[in-house]
Image: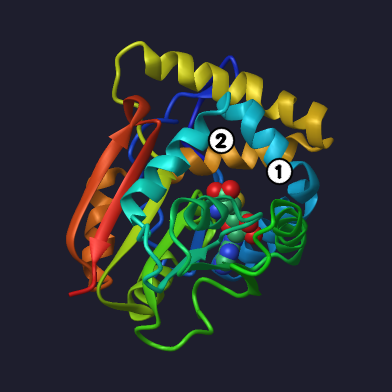
Amino acid sequence: MTAGSSAQDGIPQDAAEPVPGAGRTDSGADTHFGFRTVPLGDKQRMVDEVFHSVARRYDVMNDLMSMGLHRVWKDLLVSRIRPPKNDRPFRLLDVAGGTGDVSFRTVEAGGAGTRAVVADINGGMLGVGRERAASLGHADKVEFVEANAEELPFPDKSFDATSIAFGIRNVPRMDKALSEMRRVLKPGGHCFVLEFSRVDVPGLDAIYDTYSFKAIPPMGRLVTGDSESYQYLVESIRRFPAPELFAQMMREAGLKRVGWTPLTGGIVCLHSGARI
Ligand SMILES: C[S@@+](CC[C@H](N)C(=O)[O-])C[C@H]1O[C@@H](n2cnc3c(N)ncnc32)[C@H](O)[C@@H]1O
């Protein structure tokens, strides 16, 4: 926990407070890793350790932690990506796509011309994704590429849509990732960011804080043998910028018609922007 925060029953009292400049890592040498302040250059390695540690149990833990809600949120994201139902060619780039969920749902929702690329920095997550693609019969439609969101190895204007689900808060330089997601978009294409946000329903916020800080790390220990990774998860969610601030970051990355939709009382927010 950073200096200046206090804890009651293990729940930081500043947990839901907006953090000035949270996530705006472009101007300083330090950034957040959960509630810790760390050198910007160290964060990616620490994030990589988290996802290497949990990769094998990542999907089962997602279902448990969110009580299945992550499936609903991802389906909503796919309904906004709107892959064509006919055989028109359509390519999605799902950045920080991990074990492939959003890409699988997109090719299942789309027609014969829909393809997806999962780009992720973590070989462990991609390995699980490739196995899932084979068992779901999607190996010919979903490609897995080891890549850093901050430097995407794809040409300009090469995708119809770009998405990142529960990934951007892990990227040290979020501004770079957003610019890259815009760069590879075709004009007229949309960029979507699904991320945890600020609960805005009185009563639900207290329940959510208690559940997050008291239940999720022990659940992580039981299921993956690693509570620290899940402590990072709940802390990093609290450090993510409020929707207004994140929308401004999307605009600064050159995206237009930026908007957002809070989901499930603000637990999650779906941000979008277009390349004109
Ligand atoms: C919480 S998981 C989300 C996975 C998937 N999008 C989902 O919704 O199930 C976060 C992912 O971000 C990836 N990640 C973290 N930093 C990254 C970076 N700089 N570039 C690409 N992927 C990154 C991690 O490896 C991990 O797979």
Instruction: Using the rendered image of the protein, determine whether residue 9 is visible from the camera's viewpoint.
Output: yes
The quarter holding residue 181 reads: bottom left
In the rendered image, the quadrant that contains the C terminus is: bottom left
Callout 2 secondary element: helix
Q: Is residue 182 above or below residue 269?
A: below
Q: How is the image coloured?
A: rainbow
**Callout 1 crowding tier (Cα within 10 Å): few <14, some 14–19, many ≥20:** some
Q: Nearer the viewer, residue 72 or 239?
A: 72
Q: What amino acid is found at the position of numbered circle 2 in the picture?
A: Val
Upstream in sequence: badge 1 or badge 2:
1
In the image, 214: left or right of 192? right
Q: Which residue in the rendered view is the most extreme toward the top?
A: 203
Using the rendered image of the protein, determine whether residue 172 is visible from the camera's viewpoint: no
Q: Residue at x 38, y 15 (%)?
A: 204
Label 1 sits on what residue type? Tyr
Mark sitting on residue 218: none
**According to the image, label 1 marks what residue?**
58
Q: Position of residue 243 (x, y in %)?
A: 27, 45
Q: Residue at x 72, y 39 (%)?
A: 228
| Location of residue 120 (image quadrant) | bottom right
Mark nearer the viewer, 1 or 2? 1
Q: In the visual, does 3 lie left or right of 127?
A: left
The residue beneath circle 2 is 234
Report whether the residue tagged 1 is closer than 8 Å to ligand 1: yes
Q: In the rendering, at what x and y percent does residue 84 appear?
A: 35, 61
For mark 1, give the secondary structure. helix
The answer to whether the residues at label 1 and label 2 have Cβ atoms under 8 Å apart is: no
Q: How many marks?
A: 2
Q: Please provide percent x and percent y for residue 96.
A: 55, 61
